[in-house]
């Protein structure tokens, strides 16, 4: 049995099986819904249920509270329809544009710029054309079927990367983590991994508004891909990149960011440390507060934020409430680890 889901205000319709999450069907049908983690942790897919009834699978209360659910909100990533539905949801141009593929990838190189960050370069099969928007992510499928998500840190070949560039990922070591312990332990060059993607609705929208790129830690990865896209396509919208870490070593691609800002007239780079060592002459404090100090009025901007959930949620709340950022101008990818979900 399947049910019809109608999206408002677009009027787009698609079919969803009775026990299938709405988002899974939307991805399969190439329908552009907003989403991030796909497992009820981030809240990016929160939508208003106008008509019908759904049953939610397991999810975190921070993503959808009991009060929000009673008020008619739903998480499309874990809500299964029990009848035909009408949902109010923003359409995301370009989401679903590229087919989701399962592909084997080979480890080309593995570098560790710091003790807890690895730069992983993956080689795609020669016959595979893997397309994605800079900012999207892939999921590694582990031997036991578990999945781990990581954003591409490079723009695809069509965006200016070398034809054989493959994929670049930035991985932070989470001690005890099923996948990251392997990356920082037994993984070696030429290993084969199974991967599926692309996923996610975090990527640069077309437009002319000035851009704030906001990252913490390895949330820099998709931001780097977006900067590469801007340089390759000659996107000259004014942009400022704020990258926050605890200490200088956490800004593991600081030289790259400085070079990008030096060669792109429209890009400015502001590194921010929350626990700066003696000798640091740059900005200090919480990275999103540095944005607020510099740009107290964000009403004419778009913000693209990626990093720790606490940073992303604080930025969204404070930018909207205190800096007049329109709610629809905040785009985010919250790096929710398995530990965070637990």
Image (spheres, grey):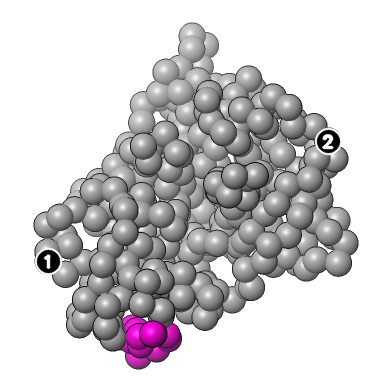
Task: Name which quarter of the figure residue 189 lies in.
Answer: top right
Mark 2 or mark 1: name the one nearer the start of the chain.
1
Q: Which residue is mark 1?
A: 71
- Between the C-alphas of marks 2 and 1, the distance is 51 Å
The crowding category of the residue bearing disc 2, from other C-alpha atoms within 10 Å (few below 14, some 14 to 19, many at least 20), is few
| Residue 185 visible in the picture | yes
Residue found at x 52% / y 80% = 29
Q: Is residue 219 left or right of residue 34?
A: right
The one of 94 and 283 positioned closer to us in this rendering: 94
Who's the residue at 53% across and 75% down the image?
28
Image check: 200 left or right of 236?
left
Quarter where residue 136 is shown: bottom right
Q: Nearer the viewer, residue 19 or 298?
A: 19
Looking at the image, how many numbered discs can be counted on the residues? 2
* Residue lying furthest top: 278
91 horizontally vs 167: left or right: left
Residue 130 position, x and y percent, is 73, 65
Give the residue displayed 37% in from the left and 72% down from the top: 19
Badge 1 element: loop
Which residues make up the magenta segment?
Answer: 1-15
State the image coordinates of residue 180 (x, y, percent, origin top left): 60, 32
User: Is 9 one of the magenta-colored residues?
Assistant: yes
Among the 4 quarters of the image, the one containing residue 70: bottom left
């Amino acid at each position: 049995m399947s049910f019809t889901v109608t999206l408002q205000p677009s009027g787009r319709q698609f079919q969803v099986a009775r026990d299938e999450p709405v988002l899974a069907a939307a991805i399969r049908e190439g329908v552009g819904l907003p989403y991030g983690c796909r497992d009820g942790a981030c809240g990016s897919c929160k939508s208003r249920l106008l008509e019908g009834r759904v049953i939610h699978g397991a999810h975190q209360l921070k993503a959808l509270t009991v009060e929000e659910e009673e008020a008619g909100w739903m998480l499309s990533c874990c809500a299964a329809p029990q009848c035909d539905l009408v949902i109010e949801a923003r359409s995301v141009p370009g989401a679903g544009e590229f087919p989701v593929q399962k592909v084997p990838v080979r480890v080309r190189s593995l570098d560790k710029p710091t003790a807890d960050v690895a730069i992983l370069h993956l080689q795609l099969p020669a016959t595979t054309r893997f397309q994605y928007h800079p900012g999207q992510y892939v999921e590694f499928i582990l031997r036991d079927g578990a999945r781990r998500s990581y954003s591409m840190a490079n723009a695809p070949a069509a965006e200016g990367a070398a034809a054989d560039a493959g994929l670049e990922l930035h991985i932070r070591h989470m001690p005890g983590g099923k996948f990251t312990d392997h990356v920082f332990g037994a993984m070696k060059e030429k290993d084969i991994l199974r991967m599926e993607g692309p996923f996610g609705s975090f990527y640069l929208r077309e437009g002319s508004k000035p851009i704030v790129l906001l990252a913490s830690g390895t949330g820099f990865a998709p931001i780097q891909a977006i900067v590469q896209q801007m340089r390759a396509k000659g996107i000259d919208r004014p942009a400022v990149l704020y990258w926050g870490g605890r200490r200088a070593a956490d800004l593991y691609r600081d030289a790259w960011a400085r070079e990008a800002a030096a060669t792109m007239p429209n890009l400015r780079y502001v590194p921010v440390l929350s626990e700066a060592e003696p000798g640091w002459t740059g900005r200090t404090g919480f990275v999103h507060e540095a944005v607020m100090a510099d740009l107290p009025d964000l009403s004419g901007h778009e913000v693209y934020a990626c990093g720790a959930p606490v940073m992303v949620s604080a930025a969204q709340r404070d930018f909207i409430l205190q800096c007049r950022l329109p709610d629809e101008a905040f785009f985010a990818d919250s790096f929710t680890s398995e530990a965070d979900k637990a």
